[in-house]
Amino acid sequence: MELSSCKRHCTYEVQELPSLHLLKVLGLREGINLKVQSKQPLGGPIVVKIGNRSIAIAKSLAKDIIVKGGS
């Protein structure tokens, strides 16, 4: 499922993502777990937590990130 359609406060495993260097620098890689902290209204960013770091991801980019899980 796309990260943009995930529920808040659930944990997901990243399956696929665009090959952008910035995502790797921020710690977003295939196989890692992330938790959706918040989803901003009106097409705003999705805030995810990876380890101790919170990252805001644009909704347009979140549509290209494929995750699985939802616990």
Image (cartoon, grey):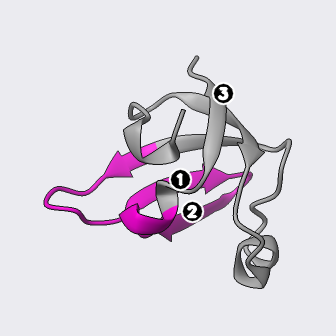
Disc 1 marks which residue? 48
Asked if the residue at tag 1 contacts the one at tag 2, i.e. Cβ–Cβ closer than 8 Å, the answer is: yes
Splitting the image into 4 quarters, where does residue 69 fall? top right
Q: Which mark is residue 54?
A: 2
Q: Earlier in the sequence, mark 2 or mark 1?
A: 1
Q: Is residue 30 left or right of residue 17?
A: right
Residue placed furthest toward the right: 31
Sequence-earlier tag: 1 or 3: 1
Where is mark 3, residue-wise?
68
Image depth: mark 2 or mark 1 in front: 1
Q: Give whichever of discs 3 and 2 has the lower sequence position.
A: 2
Residue 49: x and y, percent? 59, 52
Badge 1 density bin: few <14, some 14–19, many ≥20, Cα 10 Å? many
Residue 54 sits above or below residue 39 on the image: below
- Label 3 sits on a secondary structure element that is strand
Q: CA distance from mark 3 to mark 2?
A: 19 Å
Q: Position of residue 61 (x, y in %)?
A: 50, 66
Q: Is residue 2 above or below residue 39?
A: above
CA gap, disc 2 and disc 1: 6 Å
Residue 5 appears left or right of 69: left
What is the magenta range?
37-61
**Mark 2 Cα-neighbour bin, 10 Å: few <14, some 14–19, many ≥20:** some
Which kind of residue does numbered mark 3 sit on? Lys
- Under mark 2, the amino acid is Ser
Element class at badge 1: strand
Query: Type of residue at label 1?
Result: Val
Q: Residue sitting at 72 percent across and 82 percent down? A: 22
Quadrant where the N terminus is found in the figure: top right
Image coordinates of residue 7 in percent, x first then y, are 39, 31
Residue 67's disc is none
Q: Residue at x 51, y 28 (%)?
A: 10
